[in-house]
Amino acid sequence: MRHEPTLHQTITEHTGHMAEIPAGNVFLRDEGTRATWKVELGAFRLASRPVTRELYRAVAGEAPASPAGPRTPVTEVSWKDAVLFCNLLSRATGLDPCYTTGDDPDGRDVVRDEAAGGYRLPTEAEWEYACRAGSSGVRYGELDEIAWYRGNSGDRLHDVATRAPNAWGLYDMIGNVWEWCWDLYDPGVYGPYRVFRGGSAYDPPRGCRASCRRKSHPTLRIDDLGFRLARSS
């Protein structure tokens, strides 16, 4: 008889895969405005795979309904859901939560404590820097080898870490699901909209690039958008 893993076992299995990302810098570009800006980054840690339905259910008590399996990335989670999950996981592992939350439906009252050592969402700059892993091309490898996208996914999500990783051991940075980041996209134009990155199993190659930026309201829940965990070093 197969025994269900305990909460501790599930958390340990998933959070043990945190890559150490070195300090560096990255140039971000917005294709709409054609603006480019440089961001200096300190060292941080990033999960080698997106949060799975299995981990989400173990920590939060339940995962959003989906026909996808337990090892696929969790989806139908809003940016606000992801922030709350980070706090839940931090408390479950004895770490200081990174976020203070409130009742604002737009999430504008969410504040990050940069001194806290718990789990958090990566910033947009951290995400792209880690995705590139020292590469400078459109993506860190051949698309069919590194990603589940419209051309090979069969129009469904796949288990995490089943395509080739990048040079820093990160899986699914391109394809499978889009991933929420911490940042506001452009508050002067789009108000509370938050950034997500990476492309999904349903996207054509154009959406599956290291530099591709998308955005939506922090309450959006959709079937190809999830998230990945970061921690400050």
Image (cartoon, rainbow, N blue to C red):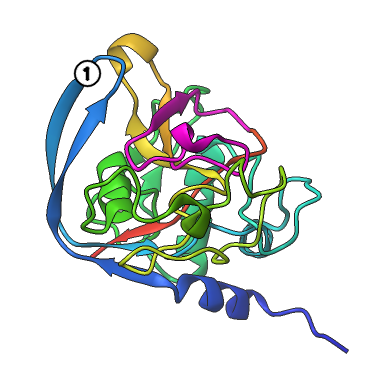
Percent x, y of residue 80: 52, 37
Q: Quadrant location of residue 96?
A: bottom left
Q: Which residues are magenta?
A: 198-221
Percent x, y of residue 126: 27, 49
Identified at 39% across, 35% down, the residue is 110
Q: Quadrant location of residue 17?
A: bottom left
Establish if 194 lies above or below 140: above
34 or 44: which is nearer to us?
34
Q: Which residue is mark 1?
A: 34
Q: Secondary structure at mark 1?
A: loop
Residue 211 in magenta stretch:
yes
Residue 146 in magenta stretch:
no
Percent x, y of residue 194: 41, 29
Establish if 220 lies above or below 7: above
Query: What is the crowding at mark 1: few (fewer than 14 residues within 10 Å), some, or many (at least 20)?
Result: few
Identified at 25% across, 42% down, the residue is 125
Judged by its main secondary structure, the magenta piece is loop
Percent x, y of residue 62: 73, 54
- The kind of residue on which mark 1 rests is Arg
